[in-house]
Amino acid sequence: GPSYPTEKDSLRLCARPVKGLTDEVAGQLQRMLMGMVEELAKDSREGMVYLLADAAVEFLSSHNTDPRRSVHDDMLEKEAEKEAARSRAKREDDEKVEQATAATERAAVAKFAADKQELILQRMAFRGDDAEQQQPGRDVLEVGGLSSIP
């Protein structure tokens, strides 16, 4: 109220039923917090909201009867999901690089074969050979100005 923090104010738990707590335990929490309000109003002229909130969190952490998941469990699950997403992204990137590399290699092999065929045809034209007269297995390969034809 307007006299906060110099005078005690009323305090009540708003959520009913309080999830994870029995009515008896919720009552214990209410009484504990009201006792703190009484004591803090006597001893202090400073605000007590943070002290009450900390006490409530501690009480709830130790008395919650439905501890399906803790904040720590949620954090670990989120970290595991992030790591799985990073692994998935890395795997996808690796696959893309692998596919690009394979495509580049296929293109290089195809170019090499086409260049080799072109060289064979040029050599045959230079020698006056006819494509039908070319002997099987006698391919021409020129690398750095050297030829495989004797």
Image: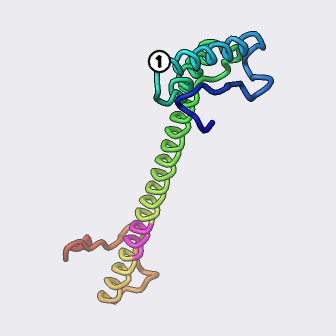
The answer to whether residue 48 is above or below residue 134 is: above
Q: Quadrant of the N terminus?
A: top right
The answer to whether residue 94 is above or below residue 27 is: below
Q: Quadrant of residue 23?
A: top right
Residue 10 point in image, percent of width and height: 67, 25
Residue 3 point in image, percent of width and height: 58, 35
Residue 139 point in image, percent of width and height: 35, 71
Q: How is the image coloured?
A: rainbow
Q: Name the residue under label 1.
A: 43
Q: In this view of the protein, which residue sits in the foreground, 7 or 71?
A: 7
**Of the residues shown, which amino acid type is indicated by label 1?**
Asp
**What residue appears at the point 52 percent right and 27 percent down from the top-left corner?**
48
Residue 53 point in image, percent of width and height: 56, 26
Label 1: which secondary element = helix
Q: In this view of the protein, which residue sits in the foreground, 115 or 64?
A: 64
**What residue appears at the point 49 percent right and 44 percent down from the top-left corner?**
86
Q: How crowded is mark 1: few (under 14 residues within 10 Å), some or many (20 or more)?
A: few
**What residue appears at the point 50 percent right and 49 percent down from the top-left corner?**
89
Magenta residues (range): 107-114
Left or right for 112, reference 143: right
Left or right for 105, reference 53: left
Q: In this view of the protein, which residue sits in the foreground, 73 or 145?
A: 73
